[in-house]
């Protein structure tokens, strides 16, 4: 009785109860027998779980004098089939189990589903108890009474609704697996988090926000936080199941991410824990793709989708369709899903974080789902394309505003921040550098606004390396930021993926080293990864070459206000490449309270005043991204307006419209919009020789336009495009040649006929 009073309980559908307690396992047997009295008990456990907990459980159970038989089954999803169900039934029949019996499922979701289905059919139904030992089973399979087995045609196609009499949840079970097989336990734990994220996204915004904001505590398995999110997730599922116990409508929302996720799992799900994907990993991919589906249908904003993707990625869960899967096989699996009705795909759609578009799965056109899941699409020309668009926020501005806001004093609310791999990597690195970690960042207004708590320049030595993927911009800016960290004896490693490790950073590192910073290359010379000793940045003059990348200059400028004294940056050339990007940095620094003076074309002087954050900062639309819809107008003879990109833009690529004008388009540009009217289709003119040094990132769009124009075009001034995420000039030459275009690389650009 004392034990019963100390349990936290959640009722489910009036037939079942979920019991929570840390270290519940110490009294589990007594509590189980008290709550579910029976003449005989059958324990079903998979071999891995039994190896950890089985002997102790059996010993305690038999000490009570009760009759217990044990059936150990193989681990893995392949166990959940007709053959193993038959083996368990035969085992029970041979041992004379009657209706005064109880089945006990000790293990993960596979054992729970299988045992529950056996209990639902044996002697027309006997009680059963769930003792889930994985996080995924706790928050998903063990609650709600859905039991099933798999067939070659798909998952869970044969089963029954059969509520467990009681579900015992003990977070301590997760610790046992961590000690025995840490790698597997960590992966299964993350798969369980995917289901908790799902539950918050469909029903409870605050649960989703906990998953967003407490990543470190959750991944460290802090029992208070973990118990909080598991209990809340179970409460939500219990509420939904109680309202709709047989999945007549509302309960279908629990399948968000599962329409696509189940198809992926059916094709490459994990069979023996050595390869493939876990259920929660497949659902994570499904949630991302079904969020993109909702965005395509006009229900979710890009900011909302960005929140979903960022939250999933924070737990190192997959977000992309496995490349080996063919779209026809994916669609065939989805069309065979038991949730579909009348040939339409049933898919749960969100219209906000914490809210579904309908209180049930929605009917969705299969071709729309096919497009979302496809690795590529084929555009079909239809004549002039016209319209008005607003492209996402500027990547260049986003990658600059984040470090400035973190270095500044006070709070800054950033609107319009671009959702991209680059900005995500930058935020992750800044989280490691900021003294308050994740608490320094908070998404509000459904992900449309990021609130940043400025550090006032008080940065810490991160506990791990700053991994920046292939974000060269972030690597260069955060190299600068790392030099101002003043913690004697500390070291910061800046690294990335394999492509990052061949992207140049030598001129920037050379300048810092000559200025007294201690920086070491850890692999190849002249490229990341690099190790920076945290001794702060001294006052004085840095000398640097800036012919390869203007980002070197911006990286030094962003760091300079946090130096130990005034800093001057003297360029070795008369001017840097891509100066508009440097001017963008200088202009943004002014908005954050730092004045940069430029006494000569190749010299910048910065005081060590630190940054003062503006209360709000609006990220303007991305002028590079705007080149695409504007180019469509030029190619098709349509009329396109790009909002939030005009004469007031700080980005050099905002002048791309004048390149289109030179090719025969009619251009109107105001302070905050640009409109392009293309000539009749086929009427674009070649550019002759055109210097794009002031808008280098737009050269690829220009190259495609040149390919369909009449006459030759020679683009110059873009040599820096060879050292981006790839050699962009070489790639454009290769891909245009595949399309039958005559073109060749030049020293600093490309020539196209």
Image (cartoon, helix red, strand yellow):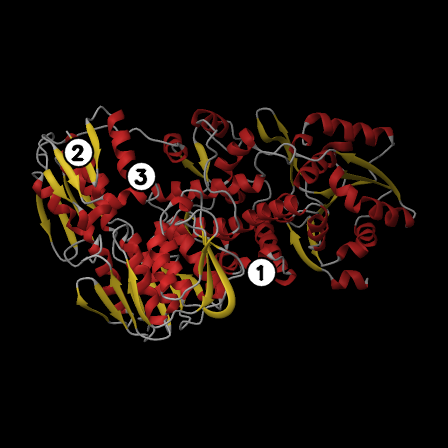
x%, y% of residue 403? 37, 63
Residue at which label 1 appears: 217
Task: Say if 662 sits above or below 383 in the image.
Answer: below
Residue at which label 2 appears: 751
Q: Quadrant of the N terminus?
A: bottom right
- Asked if the residue at tag 3 contacts the one at tag 2, i.e. Cβ–Cβ closer than 8 Å, the answer is no
Q: Which mark is residue 727?
A: 3
Instruction: Classify mark 1: helix, strand or loop.
Output: helix
**Residue at 60% in and 49% down:** 242
Could you tell whether 503 is left or right of 339 in the image?
left
Q: Nearer the viewer, mark 1 or mark 2?
A: 2
Number of numbered markers: 3
Mark 3 or mark 2, which is nearer the start of the sequence?
Answer: 3
Mark 2 is surrounded, within 10 Å at the Cα level, by few (under 14), some (14 to 19) or many (20 or more) other residues, namely many
x%, y% of residue 252? 52, 41
Could you tell whether 221 is left or right of 69 in the image?
left
Query: Which residue occupies the foreground of this view, 615 or 591?
Result: 591
x%, y% of residue 603? 22, 65
Query: Which residue occupies the foreground of this view, 298 or 311?
Result: 311
Task: Say if 421 sits above or below 435 in the image.
Answer: above
Could you tell whether 386 is left or right of 664 in the image?
right
Query: Which residue occupies the foreground of this view, 295 or 576?
Result: 576
Question: Is any atom of residue 585 visible in this view?
Answer: yes
Q: Quadrant of the C terminus?
A: top left
Mark 3 is surrounded, within 10 Å at the Cα level, by few (under 14), some (14 to 19) or many (20 or more) other residues, namely few
Q: From mark 1 to mark 2, how far is it between C-alphas?
A: 55 Å
x%, y% of residue 482? 42, 63
Q: Quadrant of residue 366?
A: top left
Q: Quadrant of residue 660?
A: top left
Mark 3 or mark 1, which is nearer the start of the sequence?
Answer: 1
Q: Nearer the viewer, mark 1 or mark 3?
A: 3
């Amino acid at each position: 009785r004392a034990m019963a009073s100390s349990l936290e309980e959640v009722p489910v559908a009036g037939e079942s109860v979920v019991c929570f307690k840390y270290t519940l396992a110490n009294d589990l047997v007594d509590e189980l027998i008290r709550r579910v009295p029976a003449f005989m008990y059958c324990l079903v456990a998979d071999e891995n779980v039994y190896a950890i907990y089985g002997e102790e459980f059996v010993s305690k159970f038999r000490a009570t004098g009760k009759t217990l038989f044990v059936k150990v089954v193989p681990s893995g999803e392949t166990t959940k089939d007709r053959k193993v169900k038959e083996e368990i039934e035969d085992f029970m029949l041979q041992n004379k189990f009657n209706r005064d019996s109880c089945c006990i499922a000790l293990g993960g979701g596979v054992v729970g589903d299988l045992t529950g289905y056996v209990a639902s059919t044996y002697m027309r139904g006997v009680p059963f108890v769930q003792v889930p030992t994985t996080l995924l089973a706790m928050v998903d399979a063990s609650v709600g009474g859905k039991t099933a087995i798999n067939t070659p045609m798909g998952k869970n196609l044969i089963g029954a609704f059969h509520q467990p009499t009681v579900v015992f949840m003990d977070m301590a079970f997760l610790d046992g697996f961590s000690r025995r097989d840490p790698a597997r336990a960590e992966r299964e734990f993350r798969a369980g988090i995917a289901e908790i994220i799902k539950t918050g996204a469909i029903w409870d915004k605050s649960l989703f926000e906990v998953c967003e904001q407490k990543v470190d505590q959750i991944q460290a398995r802090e029992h208070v936080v973990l118990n909080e999110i598991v209990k809340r997730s179970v409460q939500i599922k219990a509420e939904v199941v109680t309202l709709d116990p047989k999945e007549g409508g509302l309960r279908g929302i629990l399948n968000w991410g599962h329409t696509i996720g189940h198809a992926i799992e059916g094709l490459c799900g994990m069979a023996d824990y050595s390869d493939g994907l876990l259920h929660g990993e497949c659902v994570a991919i499904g949630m991302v793709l079904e969020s993109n589906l909702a965005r395509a249908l006009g229900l979710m904003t890009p900011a909302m989708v960005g929140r979903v993707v960022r939250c999933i990625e924070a737990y190192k869960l997959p977000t992309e369709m496995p490349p080996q899967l063919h779209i026809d096989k994916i669609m065939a699996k989805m069309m065979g899903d038991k949730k579909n009705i009348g040939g339409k795909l049933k898919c749960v759609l969100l219209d906000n974080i914490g809210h579904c578009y309908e209180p049930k799965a929605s009917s969705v056109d299969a071709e729309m789902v096919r497009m979302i899941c496809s690795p590529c699409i084929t555009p079909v020309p239809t004549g002039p394309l016209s319209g008005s668009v607003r492209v996402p926020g500027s990547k260049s501005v986003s990658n600059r505003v984040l470090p400035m806001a973190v270095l500044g004093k006070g709070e800054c609310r950033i609107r319009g921040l671009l959702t991209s791999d680059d900005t995500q990597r930058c935020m992750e690195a800044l989280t490691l550098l900021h003294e308050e970690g994740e608490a320094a960042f908070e998404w509000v207004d459904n992900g449309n606004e990021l609130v940043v708590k400025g550090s006032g320049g008080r940065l810490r030595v991160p506990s791990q390396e700053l991994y920046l993927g292939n974000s060269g911009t972030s690597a260069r800016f955060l190299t600068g930021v790392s030099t101002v960290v003043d913690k004697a004896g500390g070291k910061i490693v800046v690294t990335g993926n394999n492509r990052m490790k061949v992207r140049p950073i030598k001129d920037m590192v050379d300048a810092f080293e000559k200025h007294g910073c201690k920086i070491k290359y850890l692999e190849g010379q002249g490229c990341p990864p690099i190790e920076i000793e945290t001794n702060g940045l001294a006052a004085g003059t840095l000398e640097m070459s800036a012919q390869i990348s203007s980002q070197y200059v911006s990286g030094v400028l962003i760091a300079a206000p946090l130096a130990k004294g005034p800093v001057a940056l003297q360029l070795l050339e008369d001017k840097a490449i891509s100066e508009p990007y440097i001017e963008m940095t200088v202009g943004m620094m002014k908005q954050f309270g730092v004045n940069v003076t430029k006494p000569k074309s190749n010299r910048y002087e910065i005081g060590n005043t630190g940054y003062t954050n503006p209360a709000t900062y609006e990220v303007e639309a991305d002028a590079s991204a705007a080149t695409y819809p504007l180019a469509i107008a030029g190619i098709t003879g349509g009329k396109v307006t790009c909002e939030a990109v005009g004469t007031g833009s700080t980005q050099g690529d905002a002048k791309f419209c004048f390149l289109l004008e030179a090719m025969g388009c009619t251009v109107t540009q105001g302070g905050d919009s640009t409109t392009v009217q293309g000539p009749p289709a086929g009427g674009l003119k070649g550019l002759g020789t055109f210097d794009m040094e002031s808008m280098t990132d737009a050269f690829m769009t220009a190259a495609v336009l040149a390919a369909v124009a009449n006459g030759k075009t020679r683009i110059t001034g873009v040599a820096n495009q060879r050292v981006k995420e790839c050699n962009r000039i070489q790639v454009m030459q290769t891909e245009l040649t595949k399309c039958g275009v005559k073109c060749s690389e030049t020293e600093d650009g490309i020539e196209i006929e």
